[in-house]
Amino acid sequence: MTWKLRAACLGSSHQAMRGILASMRTSLFPLLALPGFPLSEHEPLAQGFLALGLRSFEDAARYVWELPHGRNSDRADFRLVLPEGRGTCSTKHALLAALARAHGQPVHLTLGIYEMHERNTPGVGAVLEREGLSGIPEAHCYLVVHQRRVDLTRKEPPGGSIAALAVFFTEERIEPEDIGAPKEEKHRAFIRTWAARRKLDPERIWRVREACIAALGESR
């Protein structure tokens, strides 16, 4: 079943297309999968990159990829990535998706929910083991370009956790402006269903998730 067909079955809008993307691949060389185009001095979102001497979308993506991982002071505002010099999978990819959108390019922000464990997210194993869990649902944002996932937050070599993070429970296209409360509610809703099927407390699972994120911050 294709992404659009499953989205139609679920009654989703063109901005919220869901489905298991059987034909989608995760690019092991993400910069090569991005479209090449110059940044326009007439686009407000491009001004911060141009001020840094970054003239193309590839240059901008490489710069964002190299920035440290860290939550921004406002987790819903992707415009803080450049001034604060850090970002998460949500803010970094939302910034690049918004930049591409401003230039009319087909680069889409996507929210995927996967089973987070030590093998695909090194650093969370100790927390999960302490809680007696093998894995929990985690939300991850990335770009999609011509049916290829492009992840500019993970830097492991081919065969590492980038490749391992290629199977998702669900995937949905979202807008860059939706990385705050709308994204969190989608994640919490999935956890409620997942936890109910296992007779677990969803609030406990969310607390474990927050502990995992804190552990990742300490390990980076």
Image (spheres, rainbow, N blue to C red):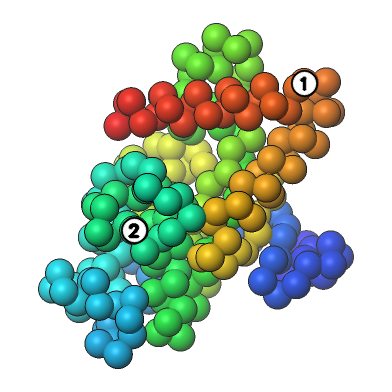
Question: Which residue in the rendered view is the most extreme toward the front?
Answer: 73
Question: Which residue in the rendered view is the most extreme toward the bottom?
Answer: 42
For residue 83, what is the image quadrant? bottom left
Quadrant that contains the N terminus: bottom right
The residue sitting at 69% across, 66% down in the picture is 16
- In the image, residue 128 sits, relative to residue 106, either above or below, namely above
- In the image, residue 25 sits, relative to residue 113, either above or below, namely below
The residue sitting at 55% across, 53% down in the picture is 180
Proximity of marks 1 and 2: CB atoms separated by less than 8 Å: no
- In the image, residue 43 sits, relative to residue 175, either above or below, namely below
State how far apart marks 1 and 2 are (Cα): 36 Å
Q: Nearer the viewer, mark 1 or mark 2?
A: 2
Quadrant that contains the C terminus: top left
Report x, y in % for residue 77. Answer: 43, 59
For residue 219, what is the image quadrant? top left
> What residue is pinned by disc 2?
80
- Label 2 CA crowd tier, 10 Å (few <14, some 14–19, many 20+): some
The type of residue carrying mark 2 is Leu
- Label 1 CA crowd tier, 10 Å (few <14, some 14–19, many 20+): some
Question: Could you say whether the residue bearing mark 2 is in a helix, strand or loop?
Answer: helix
Which mark is drawn over residue 121?
none
